[in-house]
Amino acid sequence: MGGLIAAKALASHFEKVTVLERDALPTKPQARTGTPQSRQVHVLLRGGLDALTKFFPDFETELERAGAVRARVGAEIRIELPGFDPFPQRDLPFDTLCMTRPLVEFVARRLVEQQGNIAFQLRCRVTRFLTSPDQSEVVGVRYDAAGGESTTLAADLVVDASSRGTLTLEALDSIGMPRPAETEIGIDLGYATATFDIPSAAPPDWRAVIHRPAVESGRGAFLFPIENNRWHVNLNAVHGETPPDDIKDFIAFAKTLRTPTIYDAIKDATAVGPIYRFGLPCSVRRQFEALERFPGRLLPIGDAICRFNPAFGQGMSVVAQQVGVLGRLLDARTGTGGRLDGLAQAFFAAIQDVLAAPWSAAENDFIYPKTRGQCPANFQQRLNYSGALLKLAAEDADVHRILFEVNNLMKPPSALRDPHITSRVAAVMAASA
Ligand SMILES: Cc1cc2nc3c(=O)[nH]c(=O)nc-3n(C[C@H](O)[C@H](O)[C@H](O)COP(=O)(O)OP(=O)(O)OC[C@H]3O[C@@H](n4cnc5c(N)ncnc54)[C@H](O)[C@@H]3O)c2cc1C
């Protein structure tokens, strides 16, 4: 996803953009090996949809035309949180689109392919980045082409959107520059996603369900509509528990959730195809912004910088917003000499605002005593505050809207620091002290 959006952003600033992709890309929306997460439920937050729409004005229309299902975030997505089963359903003034991950990627790719100066080279696995003789900058890539031959491609700018970011780390090693420090939040997440035909007797009062785990069980779930009148149902668990991939056990697991909503929805529904599992050991953030030296003309983006616990549904939106930052930096540098000088450092600094809120959401995993990593010093205070904020949002439609705009990455967390809100949260905390 990051590579596609970056290609579109760079196409307005460079004569030619080449996307090197290791997979043969399918001619219809379909999971593939290079994105092993693609069979899992993928939520596209409104903030991500907005960021994508800036690059692809027709994105929302095209996605819906291809089968994505529109859902009103406050009214049609039932949210179950410990203490709020469910959180009040109100008509907040924004929708999102629900679909499979392959569909999001397919629609974005079709729009990228319409751009005349972007070329795709498929079944090309990049093996390393090439550096200048003085090793101060990256000047191209070496890759194994479809026929197996090792080939090079020179470039003014190389974007590493390979998800793992290994190529960037290896480039740093090869020129003797230190790797970035990494912060990990160890959660050992287990994911299992099944597909069901939506039964004709599906409940009319919601289109999707988000069921957040209680600390005691660590078991959560998602139910989202996807193309072709189906549901994606995901069951998840933490710290080594693996949700089942057998349909009978899957439904039995759903029965153990705090509420019967998802169990009741799927117990008599028809499952389509196998159940796919995925394990993710931790959220990881690489502190590229703290490096004193970084090679010129190289830019890692997306999961190569920061990978989140997917249960918060943020990764695609965050990379779209990162590319938004990149586009603005390039716009501001247009016409200036040396527009690529120090670009990576400027980018790493500028995306910290994009990463702050989603990383803070990932830090919520410290509610589990078994979570590995450095728990933020003020974590208990944060929990108390966010608990009181939720109570206020449940009662007050305006606060509900702003909280959900922040959670959907449409507004920065500072929107919740308005004194009108903070004073009322303080009052709720005082009342429950
Ligand atoms: C289980 C799971 C569920 C998720 N759910 C959500 C969700 O609900 N919502 C959400 O927004 N995000 C979700 N994410 C995160 C999301 O998938 C990523 O954040 C998002 O795809 C952005 O990643 P990216 O662009 O960095 O890499 P990707 O989108 O993963 O793309 C990497 C690309 O690089 C290619 N590649 C890799 N190595 C090479 C090489 N050497 N040469 C050439 N090509 C190469 C791959 O084939 C692939 O096409 C989830 C992630 C996981 C693991």
Image (cartoon, grey):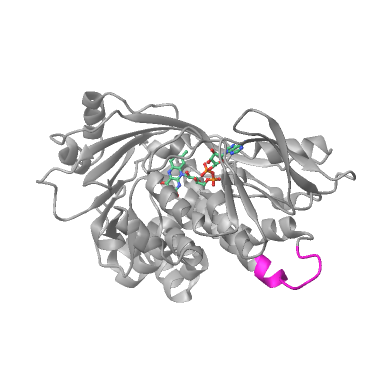
Question: Any magenta on residue 164?
Answer: no
Question: Any magenta on residue 336?
Answer: yes
Q: Answer whether residue 68 is visible to the viewer in this image.
A: yes
Q: Which x, y percent locates residue 156?
A: 75, 54
Q: Residue at x 41, y 53 (%)?
A: 107
Q: How many numbered callouts?
A: 0
Q: Residue at x 90, y 45 (%)?
A: 134
Q: Residue at x 29, y 50 (%)?
A: 83
Q: Which residues are magenta?
A: 329-339
Q: Which x, y percent locates residue 96?
A: 34, 59
Q: In the rendered view, would you say 262 is above or below 396?
A: above
In the figure, is residue 290 to the left or right of 40?
right
Q: Nearer the viewer, residue 182 or 68?
A: 68
Q: Quadrant of the C terminus?
A: bottom left
Q: In the rendered view, would you say 115 is above or below 422?
A: above
Q: In the rendered view, would you say 410 is above or below 109?
A: below
Q: Answer whether residue 383 is visible to the viewer in this image.
A: no
Q: Residue at x 47, y 75 (%)?
A: 419
